[in-house]
Structure formats: C-alpha cells, structure tokens
Image (cartoon, rainbow, N blue to C red):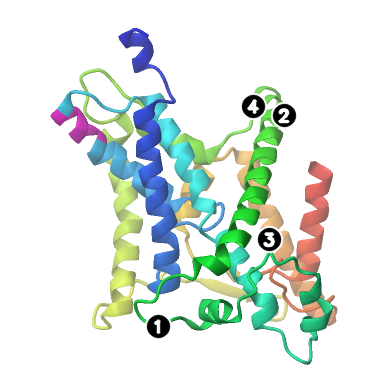
Amino acid sequence: MDHAAHAHRSVSLRAFLVGLVFCLVIAAGEPYGVLFLRGSALAADFSTGAALCLFLLLTLLINPTARLLTGSQLRSGELATVYIMMIVASAIPSWGLTMNLIPLLGGFFYYATPENDWVSAIVPHLPEWLVPTDREALWKLFEGSARGEGVPWEAWGTPLLAWSLFTTTIYFVTLCLLVILRKQWVEHERLLFPLAILPLEMSTQQENRWLPAFLRNPLTWIGFLIPAVINSVNALHAYFNFIPRINLNVSMLILRDSVNLNFTPRFEVIGLAYLLSLDVSFGVWFFAFLAHLQTGFERMMGWSIGPIQPFSDPGTPSVAQLALGALFFLV
C-alpha cells in the first residue's frame, strides 16, 4: 500500500489503539466519577460529554503534539474512527447499560423481602449462570467491602460473560438496523446528525495548519468560555461557599400553579438546537410544551394513571405512553 492510500485510510491500527485507550478512560472514569466521587457524569446513555471532551483534547493538544514530535498525526478519517469508538463506549459504563444491569442482577436477592415474596416468585426461575448467587458477593455489591478487598470475580464471572454475549448481540443487531435505515435517513430524508457535526468540524484538517479552522475561530472560544466560566464558578461554589453562585434559574407557574415552566438556559441544549434543522428544533420545543400543558390539565382535573415511574421520569406515565405511541407510529 502506498503512502497516499495509507494517509487516507480511516480505520488504522494507530486509530484503533488511540480509540481503545480513550474507551478505557471512559469505562473507568464514568463509574468512578458517579459512584465513588458522586460528581458529574462523564457520559449518560446517549449523552457523550466524555467523548467530546476527550476528542477536544485529542484535536487540540495530542494530535498537534504528535505532529510536532514525530512528523505524523491522525488524519481526519482516523479521528472519526476514534470518535465513533468513544461515543459507543459512552453508553456502556453509564446508565445506558452497566449502571442499570449490575444492580439488577443482584437486586433480585438483595431486595427480596417477605412482603414481595421474590424468594419464591422470582428467584427459583433465575438460572445460576445468568445471575450471581453468592450471598456475600451480592451484599458487598450494595453495602461495600473491606478496604483493599478485591472484586469476587468467581461469583460474577459467569453471569457477566453470559450478559456480555447478549449485549454484543444487541449491539450487532442495532448496527444492522442502522445499516438498513441509513439510505432512507441519509439519502431520502436527509436527516442531520448533530452529534456528528461538531467532531467533523473539529477533525477537518488543512495543509500547513496545526489546528482545524474550527478551533482557530475566535467565536468558537467565546462560545466555549461563556458556559465554561459560569459552570466552573457554580462548581466552585459547591465546594467553597464564599464564592458567589451565578444563578440563571428562571421559571413561571401556570395552570393554577400546577406546572412549572422552566426558562433556565441550558447551554448544551442551545448548542444542540443550533445544529438541528428549524423544523426539528421547533418540534422538540412544541411537544415539550404540549407535554407540560397535558400534565397541568391532568393535575387540575385530578386525573392520573399513577405516579411518576422510572420509565417516565421526569414526566408522568400518561405523557410517556403518548410518546411511546408516537414513536411506534413514526417507526
């Protein structure tokens, strides 16, 4: 393979290794930050904040430094490969999979009580290879273990392997569905993919330029500094009370004070809306407002199909059921 072909190859060994390192950082950093430090999540399901932060570090510092020291750097296609690996990895150690799956495997035993009768109603139907059955290992999962004590892999090895095979199958089927839908979405409907626009701009390279044009634009850094300064000050306020908090919260009660409309600016939402088409942005806003009105009218009439559930949080189950029906209709 000649040098030109190698330079334009997107999936290369070095891109895979760099992506693998960043995926390991996300896999370790997300549960450590959320479960141990109890801080802000690096990634949460479809939210890929960790991927964007690491990708910014890669394009702003690591890639130019590699070019300076070695005369070579990751090309645009290779950078795209690294980013794709990171956004996939963002959902695995977070609420998208692991943080729900692991407690679920042990919860059947730990939360079993005489009142719910799970010991006779659920536990006998659970295969031993699908869930851990070691009582001591399960209780350590929820209550912690002694300092310096390792993970009881002998109790978790087989169930994790079984669920890994299932999860791999789910990801593969999802990938196949995306391949089937790609032509309709990309060529016919010409949908925008906002999570891909920003990294594409960040990875666009020019000859004789150390940084992409996006990162050389002063407006980029003005837009970056506004939320960075505000959020940093508020974060410092949480640790040091003498630092004043920048409060941007604005809300209004409507429909006999049954619903609170929140006008607090969310900078990530503003950035995402900028990358969306106008009709999609309006649709998101309109139906969110419609859901608030529905919730308010239900509360005014005293009508409900039940309290807020995990699948509907923060909305009511009735709103969630309507959204699910709309999703079925669209798909």
Q: Which label's residue is closer to the chain start, 1 or 2?
A: 1
**Label 2 environment density (alpha carbons within 10 Å; few <14, some 14–19, many ≥20):** few
Amino acid type of the residue that numbered disc 4 sits on in the rendered structure: Val
The residue that mark 1 highlights is 146
> Against 190, is 232 above or below?
below
The reply to whether discs 3 and 4 touch (Cβ–Cβ < 8 Å) is no
In three-dimensional space, the C-alpha distance between marks 3 and 2, rounded to whole angstroms, equals 33 Å
The residue that mark 4 highlights is 186
The residue that mark 3 highlights is 289
The residue that mark 2 highlights is 180
**Label 1 environment density (alpha carbons within 10 Å; few <14, some 14–19, many ≥20):** few
Left or right of residue 13, residue 217 in this image? left
> Against 325, is 220 above or below?
above
Residue at image point 65% right, 40% down: 279
Q: Nearer the viewer, mark 3 or mark 2?
A: 2
Residue 95 visible within the image:
no
Q: Which residues are magenta?
A: 63-69
